[in-house]
Image (cartoon, helix red, strand yellow):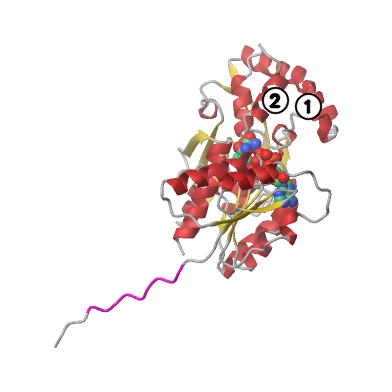
Amino acid sequence: MSTVTPLRPAAPPRTGRVALLGTGVVGSAVVERYRQLRVRGVPLPPFAWLSNSRVQVAAGDCLETAIAQARSAPRSGGPVPPWAEGESLARGDIVIDATASDTVAGWHPEWLLRGIHVVTANKLGNGGDLARAQAIVEAQREGARYGDSATVGAGLPLLRLIRELVAGGDRIHAVEGVLSGSLAWLLSRYDDTRPFSDLVREARDAGYAEPDPRQDLSGEDVRRKLLILARASGLPLEAREIRVSSLVPDALRDAAPEAVDAQLAALDAPLRERFLNAYRNDARLCFVGRFDAERGASVGLRALPLSHPLASGHGTDNRAAIFSDRYSDQPLVVQGPGAGARVTAAALLDDVLRIWTAR
Ligand SMILES: NC(=O)C1=CN([C@@H]2O[C@H](COP(=O)(O)OP(=O)(O)OC[C@H]3O[C@@H](n4cnc5c(N)ncnc54)[C@H](O)[C@@H]3O)[C@@H](O)[C@H]2O)C=CC1
Ligand SMILES: N[C@@H](CC=O)C(=O)O
């Protein structure tokens, strides 16, 4: 009798492509990293197309040409985004959202329901309206996956850690931390030798700030991150339940987008006063977000003693302490760079790879 080694059925060919929305600071870094990873032989899905608010461009053979074409496309005032009318997405595709657009975030649940995986740096998916965040969780039951590592800490393993603790049966009691990379950078650089507003421009040019830096300075960006973390912890928090102390004076808050730069100097005097008060008391200014399952949630500037664990980071470092059943006395602490195009792009492509290689 001959022995026959059973043949393994051939693995079905992989279908699915990647498409990118947003060709700004983060989107451009995604394209750059995608190219580098391909050269190194990392197995990534083929690139179908990329789009911004003006145009949709097929990736073709040269991604650099495609992104240059998209970035130089003239402004279009149409009400419908170009990708909504252009080549569509199909089941198994992975769409990367590198925009700050509420319209795009509104599509996340719809794409998931259609079997399209979503990978996002845009926090308005699960860090905005609670109903949308819940729809995103529901829609994943259909099989498509949601990659949101980039939305908190620019990919630091903080969100993942919370989900793993929850999956292991731990209850999260509180999370407290410095969750804004741009504000961490600003407050670690500010020493009253240059106006605060100058540093804000530098943070914007370095790619740490939001497209509108008022989103950082008002605490709105940290509020979104706190919502994402709280919801991942099982707390269905609404934006209005977080007390936010904004750093933005009224004149800057009310400025039209094109007038923001000219109004940034309104930040200088109040920030100088807060800095000098902290300095005289041997304290350091830190912008801190905290949610507590029992005591509510808040976001704002605090003067912390130099010995405080949250006062120890450098540059864009985020630092977050997780208190849970198993980490009740000594918190679990995560620290590392929490803003910047390169770390964010890496987090997005990590999620793409996780989805692509798990199929
Ligand atoms: N810079 C950072 O360190 C981090 C940024 N993020 C997030 O990444 C996202 C992108 O940030 P940036 O690249 O700095 O912004 P950006 O302003 O440089 O680029 C935004 C892009 O989105 C496009 N866009 C806007 N509306 C669109 C629409 N309806 N359809 C298609 N494209 C549209 C714009 O045309 C532009 O290409 C934001 O949500 C931000 O919060 C997340 C983590 C870290
Ligand atoms: N503007 C954000 C960028 C990352 O989310 C920040 O400053 O942390």
From the image, give the main secondary structure of the stretch colored magenta.
loop
Q: Which residue is mark 2?
A: 201
Label 1 vs 2, first from the N-terminus: 2
Classify residue 246 as left or right of residue 47: right
Q: Position of residue 56 (x, y in %)?
A: 70, 53
Outermost residue to the bottom: 1
Q: Is residue 235 magenta?
A: no
343 over 79 or under it: above or below = above
Q: Quadrant of residue 211?
A: top right
Q: Are marks 1 and 2 in contact (CB under 8 Å)?
A: yes
Classify residue 355 as left or right of residue 285: left
Query: Which of 337/1 is in front?
Result: 1
Instruction: Give the magenta range.
Output: 5-13
Residue sitting at 56 percent across and 48 percent down? 62
Mark 2 Cα within 10 Å, few/some/many (few <14, many 20+)? some
In the rendered structure, which amino acid carries the disc numbered 2? Arg
Classify residue 40 as left or right of residue 222: left
Q: Position of residue 192 (x, y in %)?
A: 67, 13
Asked which secondary structure carries label 1, the reply is helix
Q: Quadrant of ligand 2?
A: top right
Q: Is residue 6 magenta?
A: yes
Q: Quadrant of residue 190?
A: top right
Q: Which residue is mark 1?
A: 261
Asked which secondary structure carries label 2, the reply is helix
Q: Which mark is residue 250?
A: none
